[in-house]
């Protein structure tokens, strides 16, 4: 059964999507990723893939800005520079592909990406110690292509940032800047392709205060939750959503 495309002006939609957006931002504030992996499947059910992705992009941009504001003194600028050298051109190409593809194809592709993100994390990739900053350019390019299509793979570069030696505030803040610049490039492409319609922008702005709230509350809440239990719940949610989108299209 298809769920109708609702507007956030519909009062019943605001609490549900707002709470999901807050929880997603809360996760991102602690782990450095996961905002779109949690928020985007719910947005797809309400709006469809071609409206959900621009809305999620606005939310992820706001979440990244708030993370950078919190951790602005802990940024690793050299890593950000190399990563963005590869990611910014690639994210533009990936986003252009998104704007020109059929919604059914994108929905099924998004389902594959969600499941792939879980498999990637479960494989527990271990880049070599002292991962050189030069390698952040090709890493950024691979991330940019995937992020341009779905944005659900935002946490994929995390093991490499960790292997470089970034921890805690430096890790979350540096990841935040890298994601922020990519989302800014995506928003530019969406604007040129007329995907940033008035309803999309309004929906993104309505969710933004929830995202900021979740970022601020992040560390206070999730430090009390078992890491293994939390990751397992998120993985189950992502796989279930991925299967649903592949089947439904």
Image (tube, rainbow, N blue to C red):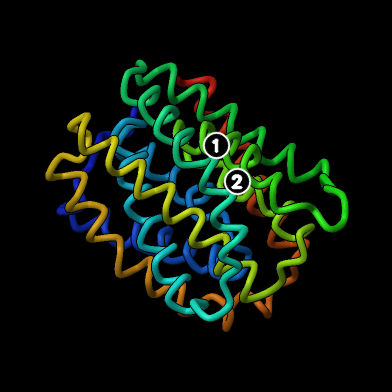
Residue under the point 79% across and 57% down: 163
Image quadrant where residue 100 sits: top left
Q: Which residue is mark 2?
A: 237
Is residue 139 left or right of 186 when viewed as pictured? right
Residue under the point 42% across and 63% down: 63
The quadrant in which the C terminus is found is: top left
Q: Which residue is mark 1?
A: 241
Kind of element beneath mark 2 = helix
- Give the tally of numbered discs: 2
Give coordinates of residue 174: x percent, y percent: 57, 64
- The residue most toward the bottom is 220
Give coordinates of residue 86: x percent, y percent: 55, 40
Q: Is residue 26 above or below residue 101?
A: below
Residue under the point 29% across and 60% down: 207
- Marks 1 and 2 close (CB-CB < 8 Å): yes
Nearest the eye: 124 or 185: 185
């Amino acid at each position: 059964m298809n769920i109708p495309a609702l507007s956030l002006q519909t009062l019943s939609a605001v609490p549900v999507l707002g709470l999901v957006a807050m929880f997603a931002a809360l996760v991102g504030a602690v782990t450095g990723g996961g905002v779109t992996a949690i928020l985007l499947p719910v947005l797809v059910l309400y709006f469809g893939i071609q409206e959900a992705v621009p809305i999620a992009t606005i939310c992820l941009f706001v979440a990244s800005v708030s993370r950078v504001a919190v951790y602005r003194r802990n940024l690793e600028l050299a890593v950000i520079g190399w990563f963005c050298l590869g990611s910014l051109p690639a994210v533009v190409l990936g986003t252009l592909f998104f704007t020109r593809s059929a919604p059914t194809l994108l929905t099924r592709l998004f389902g594959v990406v969600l499941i792939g993100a879980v498999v990637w994390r479960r494989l527990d990739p271990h880049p070599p110690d002292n991962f050189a900053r030069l390698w952040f350019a090709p890493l950024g390019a691979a991330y940019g292509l995937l992020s341009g299509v779905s944005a659900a793979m935002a946490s994929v570069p995390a093991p490499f940032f960790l292997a470089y030696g970034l921890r805690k505030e430096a890790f979350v803040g540096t990841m935040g800047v890298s994601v922020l610049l990519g989302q800014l490039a995506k928003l530019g492409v969406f604007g040129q392709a007329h995907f940033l319609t008035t309803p999309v922008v309004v929906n993104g702005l309505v969710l933004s205060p929830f995202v900021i709230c979740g970022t601020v509350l992040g560390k206070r809440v999730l430090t009390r939750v078992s890491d293994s239990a939390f990751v397992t719940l998120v993985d189950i949610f992502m796989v279930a959503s991925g299967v649903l989108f592949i089947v439904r299209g």
